[in-house]
Amino acid sequence: MLRAVIFAVWALVSLHACSLLPDYHSRSLTDAEQLVMAGEHGQLVLQWPEQRSERLALNNKRRFLAYAGQGELLIDLQQAQELQLRLNQQLLTLTATAQQQRIDISKLTRNGENRLELVSIKPANAQVQISIPYPTLRSDLTSYATAFSAVDQLIEQEIRQGFPGAVLVVVKDGVIIKHSAYGYAERYQADGTLLSQPRLMQTDTLFDIASNSKMYATNYALMRLVSEGKLDVTKPVQYYLPEYQGDGREQRTVSDLLYHTAGYAPEVHFFRPDNRHGPQFYSLNKADTEQLILTQVPFATERGTAAVYSDVDYMLLGMLIERLSGLSLDQYLRQQFYLPLGLSHTLFNPLQHGFSREQIAATELDGNSRGGRVSFPANRQGVIVGEVHDEKAFYSFQGVAGHAGLFSTAEELAVLMALSIQGGGYGWQQFFTPATLAQFVAPSPYDHRFGLGWRTAVQGDLDWHFGAYASDSAYGHTGWTGTATVIDPEQRLLVVLLTNKKHSPIVAEGDSYRFSGDSFETGRYGSILTLIYQALP
């Protein structure tokens, strides 16, 4: 909690642009800033001069990530009376007006790699500490105000044709350049007819992000645990969950679950007494559901034969996180990620935590009945708002599961995504290491479309998700309710497209059916993503 308070106070400190040439300006640190500086926080903490190599030109030089127009250094001069640094070829001279100083470097930073080196220090035997934070997102919605007109036109046209609604955030080089709401958070009644007073979509509307929960909840938790040395994904699942045994479970590794190669079928309908595995697999209780997964759910294929996307994999991973952390999944994420980042609208079961249905986008029109075509005893009735749509998460896990259940806004998801494009850090906090991130986003040896959980844009096989112009380094995920996220490190681009496309009438197709929202380009992602890339220089 102390860390959260420190970071909150730090965020309130106003930044003043200043020249960093010989007439640069600095000031003493506040108490909160001194506490930050005393800890190992931020992107870099340097003790200079250093002797890390016998090759002299390698010493006292570091690179760091920043974006043009933002950045700062915290410097503890200690015994130094004068310090000269070179930042991106510009010379900075500091004198001991105060021992601890914060230097605004926003006029000298550039997008991507920045370079800092020590030029001189007086007296020669003095040492200094230099701390550099990770970037944080800022907003500029005017520079690109007209650039996304083709995107706006497509979405608005489809709203007129019956698509429910969407919120779009685009981040380029650390700047939110697009943040728009379209259509309606709630447009239809349970019978599929239009509401007389539909509820407009807002930029801060909460969405059920469905399987994007796998990444920004479960994967993030796993990546933190790996970074802390508490989890090795190459170990058998049984190493962490001893009761996971029998029928070959002992051979399944954590990475098998992440690569979706453990051999599980896509899902088990625990919420239905007539599920295809038999009545013994019927469960409306989280503890009972977990016990079934640990000991009874059968494999559909042999281990490692093919990548078959399965919610069961991520149910197990959620359970693994709870076992390792000693906390429920939602508590762990709240403590380790969402609270420290100041994300107040990212959570499970929002109706149980002070949010009203008016703040949340609606999903299916009449419970999980597909317009009256599906019936089971536990089914809800009426338009679903504020409860996770996924039947397994809602009925069998009480809303908190490793595969689904997280709600968030587009802007808060963008903050979470910034952690990945920035190597695991944000501001003065590091949540996972760059090495762990690289391990998780690398294409799977079984199927290059997957990383460890992440979907990848390698070779363009998932253009329907990433669009035509995503780089091979891009990764992200989608969610069944109509959500898509794209992280493109090569382009320094983040895209959050949240829609409530399942909040739409059911259309009969012979003996089958579909949600009408699935037929629109907005809800099919790839066209919107392509237009976004086209809009950028």
Image (cartoon, grey):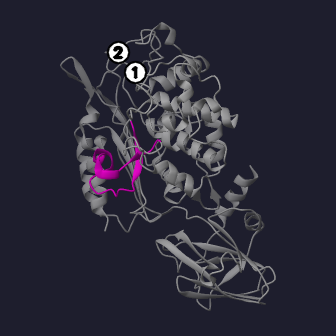
For the residues labelled 2 and 1, say whether their Cβ atoms are less than 8 Å apart.
yes
- Residue 440 lies in magenta, yes or no? no
Camera sees residue 532: yes
Coordinates of residue 168 in the picture (x, y in percent): 38, 50
**Residue furthest to the right:** 79
In the image, residue 451 above or below residue 303? below
Relative depth, front residue between 377 and 353: 377
Coordinates of residue 43 in the picture (x, y in percent): 62, 65
Name which residue lies at 49% across and 38% down.
Answer: 258
Coordinates of residue 450 in the picture (x, y in percent): 40, 43
- Residue 458 lies in magenta, yes or no? yes
Image mark for residue 7:
none
Q: Which residue is labeled 2 in the image?
A: 374
Image mark for residue 368:
1
Res 423 quadrant in image: bottom right
Res 220 quadrant in image: top right
Relative depth, front residue between 101 and 474: 474
Q: Quadrant of the C terminus?
A: bottom left
For the residue marked with disc 2, what is the amino acid?
Answer: Val
**Dot 1, crowdedness within 10 Å: few (<14), some or many (≥20)?**
many
In the drawing, does residue 467 fall left or right of residue 1?
left
Element type at mark 1: loop
Find the magenta span and give its range: 453-479
For the residue marked with disc 1, what is the amino acid?
Answer: Asn
First in residue order: circle 2 vs circle 1:
1
**Residue furthest to the left:** 510
In the drawing, does residue 273 fall left or right of residue 433?
left
Relative depth, front residue between 368 and 320: 320
